[in-house]
Image (cartoon, rainbow, N blue to C red):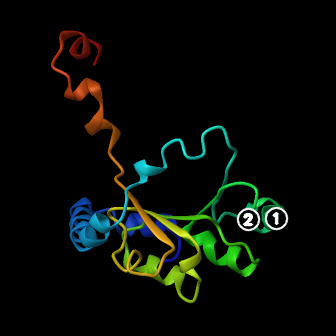
């Protein structure tokens, strides 16, 4: 599978295959999902507090020194791909977010101290990821907005006429 995210997405464009992988992953993840809290337990935990979200983009290299200075003062969330760079700079994020459902994502964590960070994962995440030793594991479900849209679910005339 190519490393490039766009090429990877195009390679996985077959929605039937994606749905099959998602369903298989959710089934495999069920023991971890039921044994750990979901993300709703964090609601309002950081209300009114600034936080830092770190992705693996090109600005990470430029800003990693600044991150180190602020990592202890604010909640630090990073993506799966950013964890290694942060670790190499001596920064341990409070939370590592992972939503990728493909097996390759587990390789991002090889040799990293996952026990020191909290995993925040989609229930569809690759099952190898929640099996790693994390400080804690939180799960969430990403819902499709069109499925959850009040316009689509409502049977009232006002919702139907505004659609």
Residue 1 visible in the picture: no
Is 156 drawn above or below residue 39 in the view shown?
above
Dot 1: element: helix
Q: Residue at x 48, y 50 (%)?
A: 42
| Residue 31 x, y percent position in the rendering | 25, 72
Q: Nearer the viewer, residue 50 or 66?
A: 50
Residue 125 in the image: x percent, y percent? 37, 68
Residue 46 at x, y = what percent? Answer: 60, 45
| Horizontal relation, residue 80 to residue 22: left or right | right
Local crowd size for mark 1, using a 10 Å CA cut-off: few (<14), some (14–19), many (≥20): few
Q: Which residue is mark 2?
A: 60
Identified at 63% across, 61% down, the residue is 55
Q: Position of residue 6 (x, y in %)?
A: 49, 64
Give the residue drawn at x 21%, y 62%: 16
118 or 109: nearer the viewer: 118
In the displayed structure image, the side of residue 129 where residue 108 appears, left or right = right
* Disc 2, SS: helix
Q: Outermost residue, left direction?
A: 155
**Are the residues at dot 1 and dot 2 in contact (C-beta closer than 8 Å)?**
yes
Direction from residue 31 to residue 53 in the image, left or right: right
Q: Residues within 10 Å of mark 2 (few under 14, many from 20)?
A: some
Quarter of the image holding residue 76? Answer: bottom right
In front: 19, or 119? 119
Q: Which residue is mark 1?
A: 62
Quadrant that contains the C terminus = top left
> Gap in Å between the C-alphas at discs 1 and 2?
5 Å
Regarding residue 22, the answer to whether it shows in the image is yes
Q: Is residue 98 above or below residue 2?
A: above
Q: Is residue 48 above or below residue 105?
A: above
């Amino acid at each position: 599978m190519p490393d490039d995210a766009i090429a990877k997405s195009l390679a996985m464009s077959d929605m039937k295959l994606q749905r099959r992988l998602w369903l298989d992953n959710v089934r495999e993840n069920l023991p971890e999902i039921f044994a750990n809290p979901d993300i709703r337990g964090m609601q309002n935990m950081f209300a009114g507090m600034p936080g830092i979200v770190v992705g693996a983009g090109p600005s990470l290299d430029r800003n990693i020194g600044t991150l180190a200075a602020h990592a202890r003062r604010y909640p630090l969330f990073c993506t799966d791909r950013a964890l290694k760079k942060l670790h190499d700079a001596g920064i341990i994020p409070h939370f590592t977010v992972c939503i990728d459902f493909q097996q390759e994502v587990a390789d991002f964590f090889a040799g990293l101290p996952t026990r020191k960070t909290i995993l925040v994962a989609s229930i569809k995440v690759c099952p190898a990821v929640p099996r790693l030793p994390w400080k804690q594991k939180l799960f969430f479900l990403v819902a499709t907005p069109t499925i959850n849209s009040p316009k689509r679910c409502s049977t009232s005339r006002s919702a139907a006429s505004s659609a």
